Image: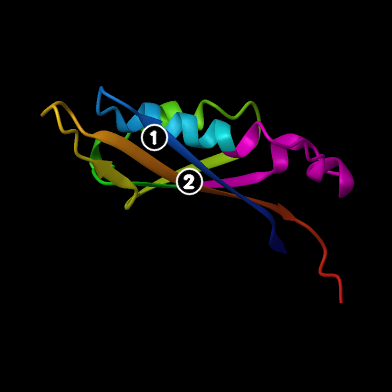
């Protein structure tokens, strides 16, 4: 039975280039780099068995390179979903807006049902 065991959240920005992929990459790293969880080992599983779902919210999801985001993860079965969200903050100097991306990273494993 597949069970979600962990969810992490992060936020990242692209200050001037309006680069949604860079903002999302920073958001993923924000979520990941603050912890070290040995979730797979806890259940006697290999890290490659982890099912990782990354939901990325940006104002222009069609501009997100999901393969770049998936490549951040060194192991696991990664799926990246781009959705509308995040925030584009206009600049007073007329330049590209500051792009903010939000991510939710969920990790699941195939584990026996524990009653």
Query: Which label belongs to residue 66?
Result: 1
Q: Is residue 49 magenta?
A: yes
Q: Please state the horizontal and vertical placement of residue 95, each as a whole percent of the image.
A: 14, 26
The residue lying furthest to the top in this view is: 17
Query: Which label belongs to residue 112?
Result: none
Q: Please state the horizontal and vertical placement of residue 56, each as a whole percent of the image.
A: 42, 45
**Residue 75 quadrant:** top right
Q: Quadrant of the N terminus?
A: bottom right
The residue lying furthest to the left in this view is: 94
Circle 2: element type: strand
Q: Is residue 32 magenta?
A: yes
Circle 1: element type: helix
The answer to whether residue 83 is left or right of residue 62 is right
Q: Residues within 10 Å of mark 1 (few under 14, many from 20)?
A: some
Q: Quadrant of the C terminus?
A: bottom right
Q: Which residue appears at 80% of the width and 37% of the height?
A: 46
Q: Which residue is mark 2?
A: 103
Q: Where 95 falls versus 32 (above or below)? A: above
Q: Nearer the viewer, residue 97 or 47?
A: 97
Q: Where 114 falls versus 46 (above or below)? A: below
Q: Closer to us: mark 1 or mark 2? A: 2
The residue lying furthest to the bottom in this view is: 115
Q: Please state the horizontal and vertical placement of residue 3, each as a whole percent of the image.
A: 70, 62
Magenta-colored span: 31-54
Q: Nearer the viewer, residue 76 or 35?
A: 35
Check whether the beta carbons of the residues at disc 1 and disc 2 lie within 8 A of each other: no
Query: Which of the marked residues, 1 or 2, is nearer the chain's N terminus?
Result: 1
Q: Which residue appears at 59% of the width and 30% of the height?
A: 73
């Amino acid at each position: 039975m597949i069970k979600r065991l962990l969810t992490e959240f992060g936020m990242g920005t692209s200050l001037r280039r309006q680069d949604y992929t860079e903002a999302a990459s920073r958001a993923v790293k924000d979520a990941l780099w603050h912890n070290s969880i040995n979730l797979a080992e806890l259940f006697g599983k290999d890290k490659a068995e982890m099912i990782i779902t990354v939901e990325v919210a940006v104002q222009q999801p069609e501009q997100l390179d999901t393969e770049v985001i998936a490549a951040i993860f060194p192991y696991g079965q990664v799926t990246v979903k781009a959705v509308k969200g995040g925030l584009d903050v206009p600049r007073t100097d007329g330049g590209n807006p500051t792009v903010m991306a939000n991510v939710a990273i969920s990790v699941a494993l195939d584990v026996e049902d524990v009653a």
